[in-house]
Image (cartoon, coloured by chain):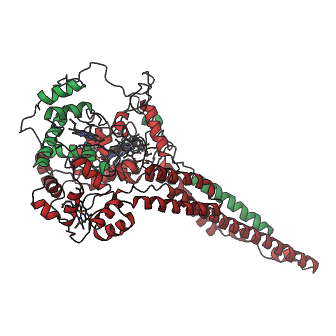
């Protein structure tokens, strides 16, 4: 009987060791790899750390004044009240009516604007309804009387608490969204 | 009027934390709280009685209106103030609307027509029976400040803690029981042995007559062979399993520098994945949003709502402190940028080896696959983890099973026709289109 009990404890110890091996993999640490040098890229991957730059990350802003390839038009209107007023009065869309594609613009609007402005543009998006963000206007707001140019300016630079969407949408997409906002405004005013 | 009410509510909650241990004081406190609250509500009642208003509201209006969320009709919290501020409409308009909204709409009242159209021309029931006093009672109810559920977590804290203690107690008791049993066994064994010794019975000699079990086992070669095979197979199975999971990070869940919750952002608040991961639409990487994207909202949201904060205690985080970390990183002092920013070092979770190529826009835009198919229930994740194994078998399986989306895609018309003729099928899978060729993923 004594011996048996000792045996039992031995078995238990062995079992415990086995179990602890199995639950060894911690989820807050990555797993082991066979050949790390084939897994990890020598070239930079997006958002990697890097000592080559002062702030220690690979992702950098383009140098001041750099221009992307392709047919790129710099946006020369400034981020000031005068710039806003100028855009409101003079800036018009480069897209003609055949190029405007509501099927593409609608989903883009839904992703980037609808969360605050509402899918109908009435200023009652989900965040507003949940009272997380307040003061979002309806596009039909008479006092604002938004125009193509002012919408683009707002989208490009932001306005007061609204941020800029220039880095999420490219130039053509921005004008598509502007056209869609104009459509919503017209629908609201009906 | 509002001030003392709020500070009263703040105080007891603060104190109550300590009071948990002393339920008597807490009872007195809550009694005081109830008294004070009823006192403060009775002050409101000078204008309209919110208690009566509540019951009227619940019986007449709650079918279509909530206070804080639009349902069939608009949310009605502070509706009187809202209509007065935004539309310049007074009590007479509201009375007229509630008693008979459709006649107001027919009369061509601008706002009535607008709100009617906004709600898809849903007609609101007419309530000609309601008196002026009834309506002012209901409006007083809608004007009451939103309840602050700060008290709740503290009150909940008590029972939860008790539960924890009692669980521990049960476990402790069980452990004690086992220990007692073990001791009893040993004692019984000893006394039995002693009896045996005393009576001169030789317990051991009896065993010597039989061959011990292990000797019998060793002598039986067949049994030894079978056991050895079983043992080898089993250990082979485990070793294989162990080696196969090396390099697979399914379930990997690192601690991020900012406790960022997809549950709150993508789930509760319904923010679209591509709002933040915008490059998934157009490029290989899906990317982590740069901090200016966060600031589009967090310029306005510097603190979470008390309900959200209370949820945070369940996860053991202080959400407001996490937002403060975001502010420190972008260098935002509450009104403007200080220019003193430092990058947030998010820890990458999903990562294919260098020799495999995966492209997001190919799958998300062209293939039309939902993010959740590969990344799991992201909108429920408080902390992001890797849902899929990301092994080659996983990629290949899906390519074998998924059909290519050819509708509205001119690029595929010709090749789809030719290939479906070749394979004699209606719908092509990705595999049949060449999604199993090594070079597509390894280059």
Q: Which chain is green?
A: A
Nearest to the observer: residue B422 or residue A81: A81
Look at the image and tell me in which quarter the C terminus of chain B lies.
Answer: top left
| The furthest residue to the front | B46
Answer with the quarter of the image where residue B442 lies: top left
Question: Residue B205 at what x, y percent from top left?
Answer: 86, 75
Q: Residue at x 66, y 65 (%)?
A: B171
Q: Residue at x 30, y 62 (%)?
A: B136
Q: Residue at x 23, y 35 (%)?
A: A169
Q: Is residue A124 visible?
A: no
- Left or right, B188 with respect to B310, comes to right
Image position of B154 with respect to A134: above or below: below
Q: Is residue A101 visible?
A: yes
Colour given to chain B in the rendered image? red
Q: Residue at x 33, y 25 (%)?
A: A61
Nearest to the observer: residue B279 or residue B198: B279
Image position of B307 with respect to B352: above or below: below
Nearest to the observer: residue B263 or residue A187: A187
Image position of B332 with respect to B56: above or below: above
| The furthest residue to the top | A65
């Amino acid at each position: 009987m004594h011996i048996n009990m000792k045996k039992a404890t031995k078995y238990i110890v062995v079992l415990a060791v086995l179990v602890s091996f199995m639950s060894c993999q911690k989820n807050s640490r990555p797993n082991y790899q066979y050949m790390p040098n084939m897994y990890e890229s020598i070239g930079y991957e997006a958002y990697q750390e890097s000592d080559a730059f002062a702030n220690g990350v690979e992702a950098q802003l383009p140098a001041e004044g750099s221009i992307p390839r392709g047919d790129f038009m710099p946006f020369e209107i400034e981020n000031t009240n005068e710039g806003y007023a100028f855009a409101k009065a003079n800036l018009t869309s480069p897209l003609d009516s055949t190029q405007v594609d509501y099927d593409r613009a609608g989903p883009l609007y839904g992703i980037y604007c609808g969360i605050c402005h509402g899918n109908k543009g009435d200023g009652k998006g989900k965040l507003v309804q949940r009272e997380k963000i307040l003061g979002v206007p309806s596009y039909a707001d008479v006092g604002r009387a938004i125009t193509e140019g002012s919408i683009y300016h707002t989208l490009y630079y932001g306005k007061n608490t609204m941020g800029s969407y220039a880095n999420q949408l490219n130039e053509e997409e921005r004008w598509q969204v502007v056209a869609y906002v104009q459509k919503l405004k017209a629908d609201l005013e009906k | 009027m509002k001030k003392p009410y709020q500070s009263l509510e703040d105080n007891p909650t603060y104190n109550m934390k300590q009071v948990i241990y002393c339920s008597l004081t807490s009872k007195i406190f809550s009694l005081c709280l109830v008294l004070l609250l009823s006192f403060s509500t009775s002050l409101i009642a000078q204008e309209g009685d919110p208690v009566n208003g509540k019951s009227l509201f619940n019986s007449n209006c709650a079918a279509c209106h909530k206070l804080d969320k639009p349902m069939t009709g608009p949310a009605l919290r502070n509706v009187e103030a809202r209509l007065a501020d935004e539309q310049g409409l007074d009590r007479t308009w509201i009375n007229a609307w509630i008693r008979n909204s459709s006649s107001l709409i027919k009369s061509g009242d601008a706002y009535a027509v607008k709100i009617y159209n906004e709600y898809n021309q849903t007609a609101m029931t007419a309530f000609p029976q309601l008196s002026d006093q009834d309506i002012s009672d209901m409006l007083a109810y809608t004007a009451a400040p939103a309840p602050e559920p700060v008290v709740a977590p503290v009150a909940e804290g008590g029972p939860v803690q008790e539960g924890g203690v009692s669980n521990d107690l049960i476990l402790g008791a069980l452990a004690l029981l086992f220990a007692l049993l073990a001791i009893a066994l040993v004692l019984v064994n000893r006394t039995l042995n002693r009896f045996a010794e005393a009576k001169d019975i030789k317990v051991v000699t009896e065993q010597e007559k039989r061959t011990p079990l292990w000797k019998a086992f060793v002598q039986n070669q067949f049994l030894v062979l079978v056991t050895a095979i079983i043992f080898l197979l089993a250990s082979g199975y485990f070793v294989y399993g162990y080696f196969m999971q090396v390099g697979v990070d399914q379930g990997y869940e690192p601690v991020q520098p900012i406790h960022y919750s997809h549950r709150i952002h993508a789930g509760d608040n319904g923010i679209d994945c591509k709002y933040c991961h915008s490059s998934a639409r157009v490029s290989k990487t899906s990317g982590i949003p740069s901090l200016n994207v966060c600031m589009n909202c967090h310029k306005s949201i510097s603190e979470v709502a008390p309900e959200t904060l209370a949820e945070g205690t369940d996860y053991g985080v202080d959400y407001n402190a996490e937002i403060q970390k975001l502010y420190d990183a972008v260098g935002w002092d509450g009104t403007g940028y200080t220019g003193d920013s430092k990058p947030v070092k998010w820890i990458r979770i999903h990562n294919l080896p260098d020799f495999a190529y995966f492209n997001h826009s190919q799958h998300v835009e062209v293939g039309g696959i939902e993010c959740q198919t590969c990344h799991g229930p992201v909108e429920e994740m408080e902390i992001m983890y890797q849902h899929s194994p990301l092994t080659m078998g996983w990629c290949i399986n899906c390519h074998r099973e998924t059909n290519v989306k050819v509708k509205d895609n001119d690029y595929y018309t010709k090749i789809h026709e030719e290939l479906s003729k070749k394979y004699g099928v209606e719908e092509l899978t990705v595999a049949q289109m060449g999604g199993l060729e090594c070079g597509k993923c390894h280059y």
